[in-house]
Image (spheres, rainbow, N blue to C red):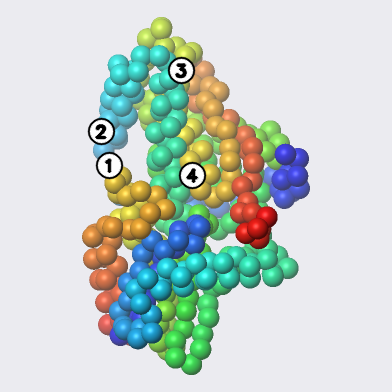
Amino acid sequence: MPIHTILIMNRSGGLVYCKSYVSHPTLKPNDWIRVSGIFHGMSEVIKRVSPFPNKNDGIVSMEDDTFQLHCYHSLTGLKFLVTATPSTQNLQRLLKEIYNLYCDYVMKNPFHRLEQPIKSNKFRTHLDNLVQRTSNVV
Amino acid sequence: SQSFCAVYVMASVSIQDQKRLSSKGDTAFANMEKVNCELFVMTYGAIVIQLVKDIGDVAKVNTRLEAMGYNIGMRLIDEFLSKAQIKRCKNFQETAELIARVGLKMFLGVEGSIKSKDDTTFYMDLSNNPLNDFVELPPQFKGKLNYCNLLCGVIRGSLEMVQLRVQCVYTKSVLNGDDCDQIKVSLEEVLEDVFADDDD
């Protein structure tokens, strides 16, 4: 499976969605909360390193030999994060499509409480289908 | 609150940019799923009438409409940003044009036009607001009930999610005999995440 994990963080760095499609042997499920917090904090600091801090979003991608990480920052402070195999293409486009799904199945659900973890089954299903479609193309 | 004015450079949006935004609005509107206008307008009317029946006091109805709009705006902004592929604005005038030419067009089907007062205030004129279709305010509500106050809340809620705290009020309404609807938006504060050590 080329896509490893998808994370969605709210504007304060809290984890609102996490789905892993591969196993991460050294990470327990709760560890993702810590990963989000650290990523959020680091991304905020890195923004200020830029000589144009008002024009950048923070960490957009990271890579190493075994995986790549991409993050899409919405103007509302949401972060959509995906980790995948190094050869996977079009991850930024995938993240934008996940943002679209979020707008539909999370934001338009009147019972969803803003900034809280996502409990929507429709969102979960559509996201899994999207990841499946992306994996088939790769 | 003079410090935040320095972030926004005094600028107006060129005609070319306005046209570009208009066509962006048209495209966004074309891609949205549509609903029957009558159903939409009557649903809105039903909400207003129910609030009038339940609350009674006109000022409180105005406040409640605005609050409902605020909750909608907070949820609508992501839809707007994602479906219309919006990038960061350079100044408040650009934000104004974006709201009028793309936002309003995308969700209401009509474009507003902007009259900027200065860097932190603008007036948005709306000449054919569909919510006003078929509506006539009885004398006891003319000049008092801001029938479309929901829109003010939507704008305020949306902008707050992109770190702009604004005040949004209805200044003119065709339901009161004016030539068009007009909403005044004033920027009060640019919200910024404070980066401080835990022990501060």
Q: Amino acid at mark 3?
A: Ala
Q: Is residue A106 shown above or below A42?
A: above
Q: CA distance from mark 4 to mark 2?
A: 24 Å
Q: Name the N-terminal-most of marks 3 and 1.
A: 1
Q: Disc 2 is attached to a residue of which chain?
A: B
Q: Is residue A127 visible?
A: yes
- Mark nearest the camera among 3 and 1 is 3
Q: Is residue B88 left or right of residue A16?
A: right
Q: Which type of secondary structure does the marked residue at label 1 adopt?
A: loop
Describe the element under mark 4 as helix, strand or loop: helix
Upstream in the sequence, badge 4 or badge 2?
A: 2
User: Pointer 1: residues within 10 angstroms few (<14), some, or many (20+)?
Assistant: few
Residue at image position (51%, 85%) is A63
Residue in the image at 40% along x and 87% along y: A85
Query: In the rendered image, which residue does mark 3 sit on?
Result: B59
Q: Which residue sits at x=48%, y=76%?
A: A70
Q: Nearer the viewer, residue A5 or B141?
A: A5
> Disc 1 to disc 4, how far (Cα)?
22 Å
Kindly identify which residue carries mark 4: B158
